[in-house]
Amino acid sequence: MHDIVHDFVAFLTKKEVVVKEVNSVENLGLDSSSVRKVRHLSLTVGKGHDFPLSGAYHLRSLVVTASNNNYDVNSEDLRNLFCQSKRLRLLEFGFKSETSLVAEKFLKEMRNLIHLRYLKLSHSNEIKRLPEAVCDLCNLQVLDLFKCRGLEKLPDGTGRLINLRHLSTEGCNSLQYYPKGIGRLTSLRVLFPVIANADGNDAKQFSVGDLENLDLLRKSLRIKLVGNAIDKDEIRRAKLQNKTHLNRLYIKLEGKEMKEDDVIAASNPPPTLGVEFTSLWMS
């Protein structure tokens, strides 16, 4: 369990957690003496278009979900929230698939949350590009973009998130490629899933050889190899024999001249790593 999630649970008996559902006519204030100690807040926003939160100076964890598809969060709301909540360690926004609230403007307001370690955004169709501002979150350990189906591009500066341990883009079906900098994230334990060029070492896009230094990856890896054919030298550069914490590798080949035998011959996987070729990728 991630430390920050464990911290959330540990305070359940200390009256430092508030679970609240609000609508447009309410203003949830955390600056009164009775709730001043609140560190962890789970907020379900109901009717209307407001984000009624004030006094959130001591928050460490904030989980926000929507109970319907008909509300928005404007930039001023977010600016106020993040100016107040500079101590946030965990931030999670989960929305209905039809909601039109979490656009790039939301993420641009986050650049000053330098203590943030856990960021999850789910079910947003509005985020097309993850802004470079996210890469200023130097302490971020978990970035989970579950079913952000409109997401087309991760930031080029992703490689600056040097403390990242968990990068998940499950259900982000519009992503066309992954940035080269992922290969510099040597603390990664989870990378799920990933697209990699297999026909050469691309200067901008993630290539299969960029797995070279990601030796802490564990459990399973699901990868889609794209390109015209298999470059065996690029496959060898991935150094799968060093991925001793991985126990399963799922590979989808997406290239006319790609052959499974070429991948196996060049990859030299360790005996502990099971390799399976599949027609599936995201699931």
Image: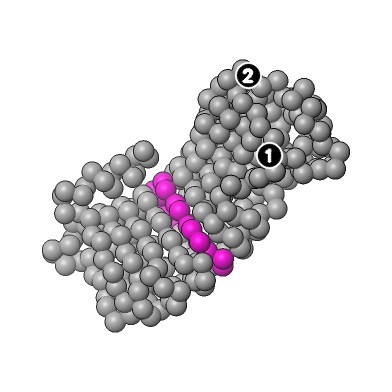
Look at 23% across and 65% down and name the residue there. 30
* Magenta stretch prevailing secondary structure: loop
- Disc 2 packing (10 Å; few <14; some 14–19; many ≥20): some
Magenta segment: does it hold 122?
yes
**Which three-letter amino acid code belongs to the residue tagged 2?**
Pro
The one nearer the camera, 96 or 24, is 96
Q: Quadrant of the N terminus?
A: top left
Of labels 1 and 2, earlier in sequence is 2
Residue 253 in sight in this render: yes
Q: Which residues are magenta?
A: 111-126
Asked if residue 212 can be seen in this view, the reply is no
Local secondary structure at mark 2:
loop
132, above or below 194, in the image: below
Q: Report the residue marked by disc 1.
A: 278
Q: Considering the numbered disc 1 on the image, is that residue within a helix, a strand or a loop?
A: loop
* Residue 100 position in % (x across, y down): 52, 72
Q: Give coordinates of residue 211: x percent, y percent.
A: 65, 32
Q: Which residue is mark 2?
A: 270
Q: Is residue 15 left or right of residue 210?
A: left
Marks 1 and 2, how far apart at CA:
20 Å
Count the numbered circles shown. 2
- Drawn side of residue 249 relative to residue 51, left or right: right
